[in-house]
Amino acid sequence: MVLTWKSMIPCCYKVDDELVRSKKNVKKQSSFQRLTLLDFDDPSSPLSADGLSNSFIGSNLINFTFTELREVTHHFSSANFLGEGGFGPVYKGFVDDKLRPGLKPQVVAVKVLDTDGLQGHKEWLTEIIFLGQLRHPHLVKLIGYCWEDNNRLLVYEFLPRGSLENQLFGKFSITLSWSTRMKIALGAAKGLAFLHEGEKPVIYRDFKASNILINSDYTAKLSDFGLAKDGPAGDDTHVSTRIMGTHGYAAPEYIMTGHLTTMSDVYSFGVVLLEMLTGKRSLDKKRREGETNLVEWLRPYLKDPKKIARVMDRRLEGEYPIKGAQTAALVAYKCLSHYPKPRPTMDDVVKILETLQEESNNTDTAISDPMITMTSNSDFSSESEKNGEKEDAATPERNGRSRKEKYLNGKNQGYGWRQRINRQRMVASYSDTALYRRH
């Protein structure tokens, strides 16, 4: 059986009425004249706290006082501490109409800018400018802010399951099922697609597992827009900017040239998708030599269906559809192309992942035939990859199948998988409730 990029993912190569309608919806969402950071970046008349409050953006948000936010977090109590990133510490709080008339009772996350940290007033203001205007089910909702003296705080909706990083790599996290991983991947992809498809595209620039927050029903939402940039305007093909982001997630062309495009986000998405498939961090110095960088180590395996089982997270215990895993691996492979042109758009990625989520409702396990073959051809390997990329993938064995493959395809097919699964199920599972019990 020969599978190609087009045959496995036909939804990227046909347009129907539904897709046309979805395109129109995207335009409707972004038809208003969105303000950009440049609109507030006038050295001759710097923006003041009152100016922000009276602006169109400020009118959509609540301007909290520092005293109010100190009260809702119980004086920024350690019992309400949720975590800390480059911006600063984050605390859990609760707001209602007793604090402000008409305010909806809800749990919130209050992020406090660390003036001695890696980010500052500009990143704080960038978050307000973007999230104060953009609304989407897969973007975290910004409720309000505080600009008082030297204090800079942001108030968001609270997402109880924390970050994808915590769900994948947390010490006491439970193992995410295949269908849950695909739901999270699809949600994050939809968030990026929304940013990229607007009349004024937004480049997220810091897409990583720790910036994807998870709701109670495993809905994924993008957070932390401090490094986001407006996309190229007019005939420009890229935005030139100083190199920022997180090592291990940033696209190679951005690191080398400082040229930023939406394809830079696509590469970062590929890294996160690979983390979700493998259950391994993008960078881990504890791994042995040659395996520290996840992309460099495992990307060559992603286009060879016979090697997908080696890549997949062992904690899944083989409970995933082989064909679905192969398709997801192909998506990651294309997103991680060394050159930006061969990468798919996030809109294409969304269409592919939507089909995988539908199929995951009737998940086949990996006890299915693991010997489905796929041939790379011109549809899959782009011209730039053929001419410019050095692939490290080992060639498949030509002199017969390995002992393991023969065994799996003999009369006892699947028995080896079941034996391994039974051994893995003896390992203790930990509940994630401990992560949130004290909050």
Image (cartoon, grey):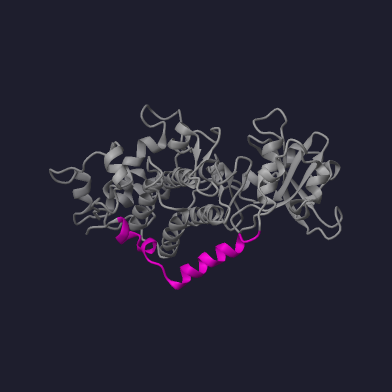
Q: Residue at x 78, y 58 (%)?
A: 105
Looking at this view, name the residue that lies furthest to the left.
399
Going by the image, does 193 lie left or right of 294?
right
- Quadrant containing the N terminus in the rendered view: bottom left
Residue 284 locus on image (x, y percent): 46, 32
Going by the image, does 68 lie left or right of 113?
right
Please tell me whether the stretch drawn in magenta is mainly helix, strand or loop: helix
Q: Nearest the camera: 378 or 138?
A: 378
Residue 339 locus on image (x, y percent): 38, 41
Q: In this view, does 180 lie above or below 335?
A: below
Residue 342 locus on image (x, y percent): 37, 48
Q: Residue at x 18, y 42 (%)?
A: 397
Q: Does the rendering let one see residue 180?
A: yes
Q: Is 330 covered by the magenta stretch?
A: no
Q: Nearest the camera: 306 or 335?
A: 335
Q: Is residue 266 above or below residue 180?
A: above
Q: Does the rendering let one see residue 158?
A: no
- Magenta stretch in the rendered image: 5-32
Residue 208 locus on image (x, y percent): 53, 42
